[in-house]
Amino acid sequence: MMARRHAGSIRSALAGGAVPSASAAGLALMMALTLAGCRNKEPTVLPPAPPTQGAQTPPAPTPAAKPLREAANVEEYKVLVAEHIVASNPALIFTHKLPPMLPAIVVLDIGIDREGKIHQLKVHRSRDDKASTVAMEAVRNAAPFPKPVKLVKFGHKDLLFSETFLFNKEYQFQVRTLAGPQ
């Protein structure tokens, strides 16, 4: 009803020459659409669900633990460890293409014992102390790792390998084992 009153006043303003005729049609259309959107609409209300006697909401199913696959060799184990580091540190990971010039590259020597615990962790190569700290904390945060079943040589305490962390300028990284060719 209100839209009709306003439309009538628009027509009278147009007839009285208050608005130039070239833009009158556009103005009238714009105001009519604006006012049409102002009408009151009743919200849709759904009826409440009928109460059930004695029924309890079943607990949400807990996600089953992801079965760990066993690595057949060191390269496969490095993939497992890299995936574990990435999954444990989502805020530190960047997934887009690597920049042409990497601000920091950190190579860590990582030793994982038969139980999947970190036995050794040291910086093998780095020129950026902050990036080294971020990489080492990411590895520590991801521990414990999958057990390196059958990969720790007889008489050795751990499986020792190197992993490279490729950093962007925000100190987020990609793990080289998973980065692939760029």
Image (cartoon, rainbow, N blue to C red):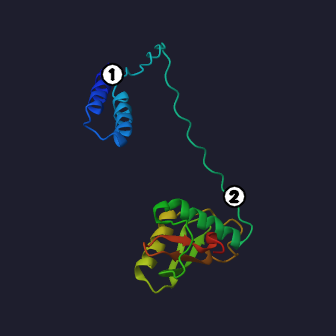
Q: In the image, is 88 to the left or to the right of 13?
A: right
Which of 3 and 169 lies nearest the eye of the viewer? 3
Q: Is residue 10 left or right of residue 51?
A: left
Q: Residues within 10 Å of mark 1 (few under 14, many from 20)?
A: few
Q: Nearer the viewer, residue 69 or 127?
A: 127
Q: Secondary structure at mark 1?
A: helix
Residue 86 can be seen in this image: yes
- In the rendered image, which residue does mark 2 sit on? 69
Quadrant of res 179? bottom right
Question: Looking at the picture, how far across and down is residue 12, in whole percent?
Answer: 27, 27
Query: Residue sitting at 44 percent across and 15 percent down?
Result: 47
Q: Nearer the viewer, residue 1 or 128?
A: 1
For disc 1, the marked residue is 4
Image quarter of the C terminus: bottom right
Q: Residue at x 70, y 72 (%)?
A: 75
Between label 1 and label 2, give the one nearer the viewer: 1
Residue occupying image coordinates x 48% and y 68%: 138
Residue 115 in view in this figure: no
Along the polypeptide, which appears first: circle 1 or circle 2? 1
Q: Which quadrant is home to the N terminus? A: top left
Q: Is the residue 86 above or below the residue 53 in the image?
A: below
Name the one closer to the observer, 127 or 158: 127
- Give the residue type at disc 2: Arg
Relative to 107, residue 139 above or below: above
Secondary structure beneath disc 2?
A: loop
Q: Which mark is residue 83?
A: none
Give the amino acid at mark 1. Arg
Judge whether 4 appears above or below 103 on screen: above
Q: Residues within 10 Å of mark 2 (few under 14, many from 20)?
A: few
On the image, the x and y values in percent for residue 166 come to: 53, 76
Within the image, what quadrant is residue 82 found in?
bottom right
CA gap between label 1 and label 2 equals 72 Å
